[in-house]
Structure formats: structure tokens, C-alpha cells
Amino acid sequence: MSTQESTLAAVSAGRSWQERLEPYLAIVGPLAMIAMILAFMAVVEPARYFRLSNLNIILLEAALYMPMAMAMTFVITQRGIDLSIGSVAALTGIIMAFAIKQYGFPAWVAVGMALMIGGTFGLINGLVITRFKVPDLIGTLAMDLVYRGFALVLAKGLVLARFPDLITDIGRGRISGFLPIPVLIGLITFIVGAIVLRKTWFGRYSIAIGSNPESAEMTGIAVDRYKVYAYVLMGAMAGLAGVMLTGKLNAIQATSAPYFNLHVIAAVVVGGTSLFGGRAYMLGSLAGVLLLSLMINALVTLRIEFFWQSVASGVVIILSVGLYTWLQKKDRDGSKGVLASLSTPDNRKLFKLAAVLILGIVSLIVLGFVFATTTTGSG
């Protein structure tokens, strides 16, 4: 055993079980909430919720957001944000649709065009932020309006439908009747994203940039260049999502994908990636995507109105952001780790607040279920 390996082994052996558990706390939150949803639905609506057909719906819904959540993990890790991904997905889907239906391009060529055009839009976002020094929030919000406007101009109110089998296979096809193709695509993007995050310079630089951009630049990292790379990746994955959405619905229009940005950002943040940058959990982002898909599907299964779904989703986001903000506070105040600080008075108050919020979510679901049952019975 080399000297370096001996040193690493000694350091690992000297770590307490609390310190070893700490890196996995990010995924505990979404997994715990997933378990709560499954347990609740097992009691309330087991027959409808745990059907194979419903599981397929959940997986297809989650798969649509997986590539974007992977890319958004890099963007948020660098202290960035991208609010334009819904418009990019819609616009790339419309361009792909026109390329196939009006100009006769083969489907595989049009898919490649959608990915490249999405990456180009991401490049534009990155240049707006790095060259013109526009804050990420404002820059991508403005570009969201631009892309959505172009989509409206191109589509002219039309709904473009009926695409070749390749497009529908990407959106809702299956391999030998078993694994949905979009789920396979989403999982592959996450596997590649996890490898890039942990094993390449781009992943390490992304974490360094998010931790301290000034220090990263002083060490020789081309901060602006790697930010642009992250936005190009985000744009390409939004373009892929546009293809998947078009194939799933076998149609696309200018107003498609209106809430993609909120859903994807929520999934990444719920999965433990820090909005303050410097901390990324690719597996947590995947768990966040699954959590939101399970939750929305549960609310639909309970026949709860869309407005209540929005309330519940917003509460989950607030709860998750508040929890991870507190978890990261220990890095700034010098406390002795997360688990060692759980017994302080302030943190006991936090847990009481978290319990109240969780109780509120459950109460909303129960209330919606009661209303739905009453309405069905009276009708």
C-alpha cells in the first residue's frame, strides 16, 4: 500500500459514523418524503395508485424532467439558474416539427437539429450572463420571453401533430414491452452526469466555482468559460426534453412546457444541490424528480384540483429549501456537523416547524380527498 493510500485509509478510519453519514443526508429527505407518499397512498388509494399502468405514467412523467435536472444540477452548483428551459423546449420542438413536416428532414436529422439548436440557445444564455454581466436570474428570464415569443411567431397558434415513429418512440416507446425508452434516456443522462460531476475537470471546476468564484478564478480556472459550458449543456438537455415532450404527446405548440423551469429547479433543490453553489448531488436530483412526479400523480389520483396541487408543490419546495439552507449553515457557523447540532434549541424549533409543514401537506391531501369523495358521492 502506498503512502497516499495509507493516509487516506487512516483519515477514513478516524472519521466518526456521523461524519460518514453526512454526505448521504441530501438524499434522505426526498426518500423519506417518497416513503410518506407511498405509505399514505397505500392506505387511501392502493388499487388505483399502485397499478402497473399508473407506475408507467409516473415513470414517463419523471423521465421528461431527468435530462434537464441533470444539467440544472451543474448550473445551480455554479451558483447559476436557468428560467428559460420551458421556452427552449417548446421552441426546439416546434423547429424540429417544421423541419420534419414542412421541409421533409428525416426524423433522426431533426432530432439532432433540436439538440444542437437547444445547445445554441444555451450558448446565448451563457454569453448574455458572462459577457454582458447580466445576473443569471434576469438574463434567463429575459431570454425566456424571447424564446417563447419566437415560438409563438413560428407556430402562429397551430398545434403541430402526428410525427414519425422515431419521435414517438423517444417520447413514449418501450423496449420489448418492458422498459420505457424515455426512462432509459433519462437514466443514461443521469449516469453520464454523475460520472462527469465526480470524475472530470468540468465537474470539479463546477463545484469549485460555486464554492467561491473569486478563489476559483485566482487559481486559474476560466470561470466564465465553464459557466458557458454549463448553460450549453442545459440548453441541449432542454432541447432533448422538447423532443421527448413532442413524442410523448405526438404534438407540440408554442405554449407547451410552461412550468418546466419550476419543476426542474424544485427537483434539483429538493435533491440537496445548494442554491448557494458548491454542493451537488446527482443522485439527489434523480430522487427529487421521482418525488415530485409521485406527489403530483398522487394528487391527481386523489382527484384534487390543480390549484391544490400547486399549493402542495410550493410547500414541499419551501420545506426542502429551508431544510438544506439550515444543513449548509453549519459550514458557515463552524458547528461540529449536522448530526451533532440537532439537539440545540434553534434546531428543535426548526424541526417543529418542519413537522407543522409536513402535517399541513398531509392535511391538504386529506382535505382534497374528502372534498373529492363528497363531490363524487353527491354527483
Image: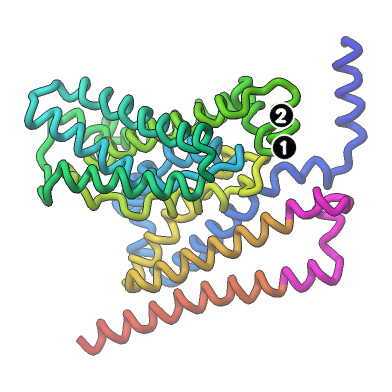
Identify which residue is drawn at 71% across, 29% down.
216
The reply to whether dot 2 and dot 1 touch (C-beta < 8 Å) is yes
Q: What's the residue type where badge 2 is placed?
A: Ala
Residue 112's image quarter? top left
> In this rendering, is residue 17 above or below 124?
below
Report the residue marked by disc 1. Answer: 212
* Residue 26 within the magenta-colored segment of the rendering: no
- Looking at the picture, how far across and down is residue 87, in whole percent? 32, 45
Q: Which residues are magenta?
A: 327-351
- Please identify the quadrant where the C terminus is shown: bottom left
- Is residue 92 among what the camera can see? yes
- How many angstroms separate mark 2 from mark 1 (CA)? 6 Å
250 or 155: which is nearer to us? 155
- Please identify the quadrant where the N terminus is shown: top right
Residue 219 is left or right of residue 248, and the answer is right
- Looking at the picture, how far across and down is residue 81, in whole percent? 51, 45
- Looking at the picture, how far across and down is residue 331, in whole percent? 80, 48
